[in-house]
Amino acid sequence: MPTMTDPSDAPRARRGRPQSGGREAVLVAAWEVLKEKGAARLTTREVAERAGVSEGSLFYHYRDRSGLLTAVIEDGLTGVGAARTGEAEGATLEGVLDGFTRTVEGFLDRSLFVMIAAQSDADLRQTLADRLISSDMGPHRGIRALGARLRRGQEEGLIRSDVDADAAALLVYSACFERVAQRHMISESYGADLPGREDIVTAMSTLLTPPSA
Amino acid sequence: MPTMTDPSDAPRARRGRPQSGGREAVLVAAWEVLKEKGAARLTTREVAERAGVSEGSLFYHYRDRSGLLTAVIEDGLTGVGAARTGEAEGATLEGVLDGFTRTVEGFLDRSLFVMIAAQSDADLRQTLADRLISSDMGPHRGIRALGARLRRGQEEGLIRSDVDADAAALLVYSACFERVAQRHMISESYGADLPGREDIVTAMSTLLTPPSA
DNA sequence: GTCTATAGGTTGATAGAC
DNA sequence: GTCTATCAACCTATAGAC
């Protein structure tokens, strides 16, 4: 669901008049329509209607249709910073992988949707790409983070040191990505008979544990 | 690129008059526009123009815009049957993984694009989902195939038998999926600094090889 | 099967009052 | 900031001749 702009500054009085919520209502409505009908069938008319505002108001806040879609994308991407691996600091290998996969799947569940929606329009796709690259928010971020964590485990002798830690990290990240993508693109229940997140964590833990241990 | 309808039956005379190629030209043009501008900005007008035919002709062949898009999707999915694992029968573990990843990435390079395009419209998304499920063409097919192959390797003692073969298969498949998806969704060069296909094959081979060997 | 011409219906966007 | 009214552009789809 879209993030309300700055609930953090509620206590302090703001400059100008208080927001009546129209802007946010539009964002929420756009998100819903995007999810229900897809980007191609999202019309400013329907979004305004659902938000309970006029179309004129919509265009006042978001310059044009493209601006609205861009805003939805930007909003869907916020919170990527929360995708840390640090949480499972002193944990076991299995704990690290469990935390990582949970975090990644959680993030993707919220953001992958807008990433896919952006693909329906060349301009939006470009906007998304620029944003992901310039903000250093692409998948390589999570992969490198986990890779570094695994490398530390290798130095400590807790993880097999004869494998590329980044490759292993990519494998784990990818499994999360694939699972979420299939759920979104095919159906919520698709792939229920395939190995789940826990199975993947277990398998990777076993594989990465040194033979000696 | 779209598949020309049945080059196989060219030698034999067909019923009705010979095709003049208009139908295929439209399919090719639609594919191009889809790739360049995205599904939301694909208009029947532009497709007809690029194909060098009239709009009337386009609607004659493909009932409506949705029918055209559906045809493109169906076409983009053909050839999935070619995604076999059998090719690398008697090969080494590394050979099996190399062949599998090559095949999967090759297939996804052709088909993932239309799968993503279908997400821009609720109807198309449904069409795609139905097709993938009813034709048993979803990702689970490739995953199960590789899983079975790995399980045979386990029975032969060539692969660690203390891990879930399907989970390992899913990890490998997912890596291919993620790599192709990022290339398509962000940019062709994105992720060039991340582990490549070979690195993944190498890592997984090492991980799956029994400690004894 | 293909073309031309055109109808019919949306849609994104603006202007101006409040 | 929000609304109403309105438009111009565009796009899908059809009709009918060839």
Image (tube, coloured by chain):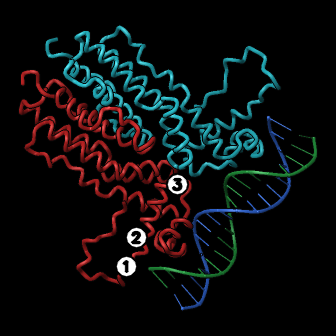
Chain colours: A cyan, B red, C green, D blue
Residue kind at label 2, given as amino acid type: Glu
Distance between the Cα atoms at labels 1 and 3? 29 Å
Q: In the rendered structure, the residue with mark 3 lies on which chain? A: B
Check disc 1: other Cα within 10 Å, few if <14, some if 14-19, many if 20+.
Answer: few
Marks 1 and 2: in contact by CB < 8 Å?
Answer: yes
Residue that label 3 marks: B37
The secondary structure type at the circle numbered 3 is helix
Q: In the rendered structure, the residue with mark 1 lies on which chain? A: B
Check disc 2: other Cα within 10 Å, few if <14, some if 14-19, many if 20+.
Answer: some
Name which quarter of the figure residue B146 lies in.
top left
Q: Left or right: where does residue C3 sit relative to residue B17?
A: right
The secondary structure type at the circle numbered 1 is loop
Give the residue at x 20% y 49%.
B84
Distance between the Cα atoms at labels 2 and 3? 20 Å
**Disc 1 vs disc 3: which is toward the camera?**
3
**N-terminal label among 1 and 3:** 1
Residue kind at label 1, given as amino acid type: Gln
**N-terminal label among 2 and 3:** 2
Q: Is residue B103 above or below residue D18?
A: above
Residue that label 1 marks: B19
Q: Left or right: where does residue B67 sit relative to residue B43?
A: left
Q: Is residue B16 above or below residue B21?
A: below
Give the residue at x 28% y 33%.
B171
Quadrant for the N terminus of chain B, please: bottom left
Give the residue at x 30% y 30%.
A171
Where in the figure is residue A105, as x and y percent of width and height?
Answer: 42, 28
The secondary structure type at the circle numbered 2 is helix
Where in the figure is residue A172, as x and y percent of width and height?
Answer: 32, 28
Are labels 2 and 3 assigned to the same chain?
A: yes
Residue that label 2 marks: B24
Residue kind at label 3, given as amino acid type: Lys
Where in the figure is residue A189, as x and y percent of width and height?
Answer: 39, 38
